[in-house]
Image: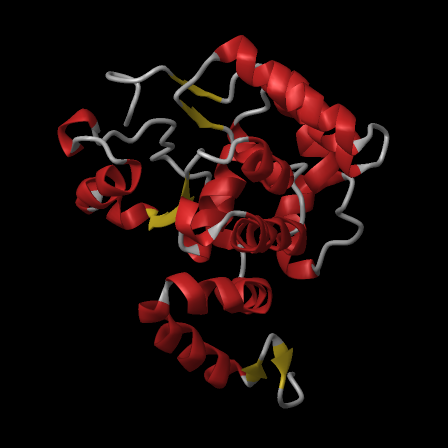
Amino acid sequence: MFKNNFDTCHEPDIESTNHHVINYLEGRISARAIRDYIVARDKRFKLEMESTHSLIYISRELAELFPSAKFVVTVREPLSWIRSRINFHFKKHPEEWEEYRQYFWMDRTKVYAKEESSLEEHGLASLDVYLKQYAEHYQLALANLPEDRRLFVTTDHISDETSKIADFLKIKSSLIKVAHSNAEPDKAAFIDEIDRDFLLRKVWKHCEPTIRHFFSERIPFYEENMNRLGWNNGQPTRNEP
């Protein structure tokens, strides 16, 4: 959206970036070390706009180190997101993302329910792990990014909100070009084999606050299905067969 008119980059030096983020989260490097790394990285790339989703884990440090920076956070409806994430992980295994993939997903997957045996068969993480991380991203964004310096945009409305994004960034809307890259239109067939009710319960269990915050129009859909399934707040309200 910005590359035609600004110095931008999507996930620059991602292997090193992810490695430092993981080391910081694991306590292997200090807060001072990660801050020094961020500053040096910024001076090296000299970017006006960067899109790197793993930086959410050091979003507090970013907001403090760059007090004039603004943050545009895209939010995808979780039921749509999980299908896309599973499909992407099944089809692509970029070497530079392997440490991240192992740390955030595979190493945290301990068990699989019988309904997600196809995920285990194809070397993917469990729904609990994927959806917990999805929810964590937006919890971190809400907690760490100053309210006056952040803008949340749902992915299905990006094309309609270029003016809103431009106003937030104080640039001309004509400088923003709407585009959709990294799309995977052909979904892996096994995704549809996952029991839909099981999937809905998992999405609601982990993502209810995110849905209520960003997708109020979807609340009736989920509540209707949870009532049908006898679930409330991610837990069964009656004995299931």
Q: Residue furthest bottom?
A: 238
Name the residue at the left extreme: 174
Extreme-top residue of the structure: 44
Residue at left offset 26%, top offset 41%: 165
Residue 162, horizontal then vertical, whole percent: 21, 40
Does residue 178 appear in this view? yes
Task: Tell me if 167 is positioned left or right of 48 in this view.
Answer: left
Q: Which image quadrant is residue 239 in?
A: bottom right
Q: Nearer the viewer, residue 195 or 162?
A: 162
| Residue at left offset 55%, top offset 12% | 43
What residue is rendered at 58% in x and 64% in y? 202
- Residue projecting furthest to the front: 67
Tally of numbered tags: 0
- Residue closest to the eye, 229 or 167: 167
Indicate the position of residue 16 as horizontal and vertical percent values: 67, 17
Q: Which colouring convention does the figure follow? A: secondary structure
Q: Looking at the image, can residue 75 be seen?
A: no
Q: Is residue 127 above or below residue 174?
A: below
Residue 153 in the image: state x and y as whole percent.
Answer: 34, 48
Q: Is residue 48 above or below residue 66?
A: above
Quarter of the image containing the C terminus? bottom right
Does residue 183 sit above or below 130 in this rendering? above
Q: Is residue 148 above or below residue 101?
A: below
The percent coordinates of residue 91 (x first, y second) are 52, 29
- Asked if residue 206 lies left or right of residue 103, the reply is left
Residue at x 58% of width, y 34% of height: 62
Picture quarter with the N terminus: top left
